[in-house]
Every structure is written in structure tokens, then in C-alpha cells.
Image (spheres, helix red, strand yellow):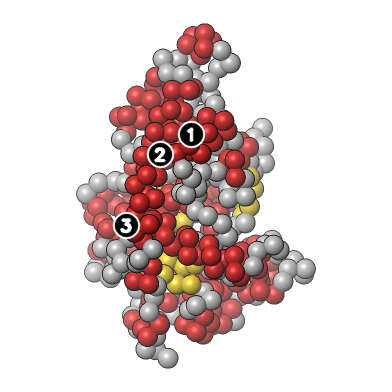
Amino acid sequence: MAKEFIVTPWEVKGNIDYDKLIHEFGVSKIDSALLDRIKSHTGELHYLLRRGIFFAHRDMKFILDEYELGNKFFLYTGRSPSGHTHLGHLIPWMFTKWLQDKFDVELYFQFPDEEKFLFKQDLTLEDTKKYTYENMLDIIALGFNPKKTFFIVDTIHADLMYREAIKVSKKITFSTVKAAFGLNNESNIGSIFYTSMQAVPAFLPCVLKNKKMPCLIPHAIDQDPHFRVSRDVIPKLGYYKPASIQCRFLPGLGGIAMDGKMSSSVEDATIYTTDDEVTVKKKINKYAFSGGKDTVEEHRKHGGNPDIDVAYQWLVFFEEDDEVLKQIHDDYKSGKMLSGEIKAILIEKINSFLKVHQKKREVAKKHVDEFILKKHSAHHL
């Protein structure tokens, strides 16, 4: 019997059964018909879709129906700043950029800089301010369109957001929040109110433009409880239910069964976008869980297990070429390729990616202001 796993917006642990999660969360599996329909608009499928890394959705068909009628959706995703960006964070953002490019749509990117402050005892607002800036550099470095990408920071845009958040909060009961997020009578009242703020970007562009538009939220599956609650409330305010598309987690270096997903709090099992080449090499060689056999002789004879090998699992997320990935899979499984060799391929892949990313990150420092949502657009006040 599989070990129990935990998936909440604040904790992910264990070997996750994604089919079970689909059932528990009530999301729909992305099927071949939906993939074909997306491809009819994009011309190609992103490798994260082809490989089932983005595997579930809510109301994606509605998004495409409206798009085909000429009612363009907008994108909403976010990052709760509590530490430096790691590679796992980049996965939904890379896919979000592809959606922005292929459908030519706007993105509203939320930095709820109060969330982790409210939920983590040792985090200050000064900490979250610092990490908000650092995280912004990583997002800009991925190449989002500055004319169509708008950063919303909860404490900076509070004047825009609070008016809408209290409308949301009036429709959510304490018992709903307790059930959805595992809160209790000892939870601080900020954490109870917080989900109202997270709901706002899913309809704020409709308020700003005075126009009813669909919203699509790409995110990792652990954030789904927030949007389940907001989907119930937002139609009561006169807007469409936000649709969403969910991805699997990039496992931590310690392995899928142990880590569940990569976490900023486990530094050795995590690669950050700011790590240098030596650090990346050391972490992967030392900590990446291997699916290889104990001896070279045994490995050559029986082959490795790519299903549990972290280096291979990471290549599924970062090697875009299907043929290259298949060759690595087959060579490793047959014993032709050793664990050290597959780690070397991953090290080269990650370091070449980070070399480019870090240069773009430096350039991004000059462009942060271009991405922050201008408050004067609040003509509804």
C-alpha cells in the first residue's frame, strides 16, 4: 500500500498519487481531445503538456469556447515571496509565458507578500519585501511581455485590492476557510482573511476594464484549495468562475517518495536560480537520488530505474527534445548509461540554463518598474 501523502497550499510531502489527487480535488484530467483543441490554436504543444506535467484543469473548455467567440481570457498566477526562487517555481511560469505568447493575452502576476508573513512565525515584512524584489527578477528574466504583464503586490496595491477583497470576504464563512485550509481557532485572523486577497486578481482586470472576461490560472496543484473557494464566490460578484490548469511538482533532489516537491526550506535538496555552477554540480552529484544499481557490473546487467531516478525525472521537466529524452531513458534503463553519466547530463543542462537566466536576471534589475501595475488605472474609484 502506498504511503500517505500530504498536499496543501503550505505543505507537500510523500509520494504523490496524482490520480488520487484528481479525485480528491475534483479537477479534470487533461485528455487527448483537449490537447488537440489547444494545439489547434497554438500550432504545437508545449512539452510540459505533451508529457503530462500539466495534467489537470478546471473549465479549460470554457476558456477555449470564449476565446473562439472572441472573448479573450487573461492569465493570473503568482508567487508568495518567502525565499529565493528555486527551479521548481519556474515550471508553471515557463508554461504561463508560453500561454501568453501563443494566445497573445495579458498576465496579472500577484505577489501576496503578506501570506507567508501571516503563516510563518519567523518571517518579517522586511523579509517578504526583499524576496518580492528577488522573485520579480526571476520572472522578468523568463521573458514575459512587459506591455502585457502586470505585477500586483498586495501591500503596495492594497488600495486597489482591499475594496474587492472585502466583497469576497463577505461571501466566505469561517467554517469554509477552516475546512479548506485546515485553520483552527488558534489561527491568526489575518490568515483567515488572506484567501480573499488571493481571489482578487482572478477578477480585478474585469473591474479595471469594466468588462467581463474569463480568467485562466496556471499553477501547481497544491494551490488549488484557494481557487476552489474563490470559484464559489466570484460568480456571486457577477464575474466568470476562474478556470485553472494544474501541474505536477518538480521533486526535490532527495527523491519523489521522500520530498514530494522541491522546497525552499530544504537547501541541500533544492537548486536556486542564483546558485553558481560549482554549487549546482555539488548538489546534484551529492544529493540527487539515484535509480541505479549498487555496482557498475550490476547496473550494466540489470539497468537503472528512470521512474525513481531524480536526474532523469528532472530531465523530463527541463529537456525539451522528446527524442533526446527517450534516448537517455532507454540507455539508462538498459544499463548502457550509468548514474554518474545521467547526473552529468543534468548538471550540464541546468548550468547552461542558469548561465543564460542569471544574465537576464541582471538586466531585469533595470526593468522592474515597467512590470508593476500602475495604480492610475483604477478609474473605477
The residue at 55%/54% (across/down) is 222
- The count of marks equals 3
Numbered circle sitting on residue 281: 1
Q: Residue 86 vs residue 357: left or right? A: right
SS at badge 3: loop
Q: Nearer the viewer, mark 3 or mark 1?
A: 1
Report the front residue among 206 and 20.
206
Q: Are marks 2 and 1 in contact (CB under 8 Å)?
A: yes
Q: Local crowd at mark 1 within 10 Å, few (<14), some, or many (≥20)? A: some
From this view, report whether residue 93 is shown above or below residue 253.
below
From this view, report whether residue 298 is shown above or below residue 221.
above
Q: Nearer the viewer, mark 2 or mark 3?
A: 2
Q: Which residue is mark 2?
A: 351
Mark 2 or mark 3, earlier in chain: 3
Percent position of residue 88, x then y: 49, 47
SS at badge 2: helix
Q: Residue 140 vs residue 250: left or right? A: left
Percent position of residue 377, x then y: 36, 83
Answer yes or no: is residue 335 visible: yes
- Which quarter of the image is occupied by the N terminus? top right
The residue at 48%/16% (across/down) is 303
Mark 3 or mark 1, earlier in chain: 3
The residue at 48%/60% (across/down) is 134
What's the CA distance linking mark 2 and mark 1? Answer: 8 Å
The three-letter amino acid code for the residue at tag 1 is: Lys
Q: Local crowd at mark 2 within 10 Å, few (<14), some, or many (≥20)? A: some
Q: Which residue is mark 3?
A: 143
Q: Are marks 2 and 3 in contact (CB under 8 Å)?
A: no
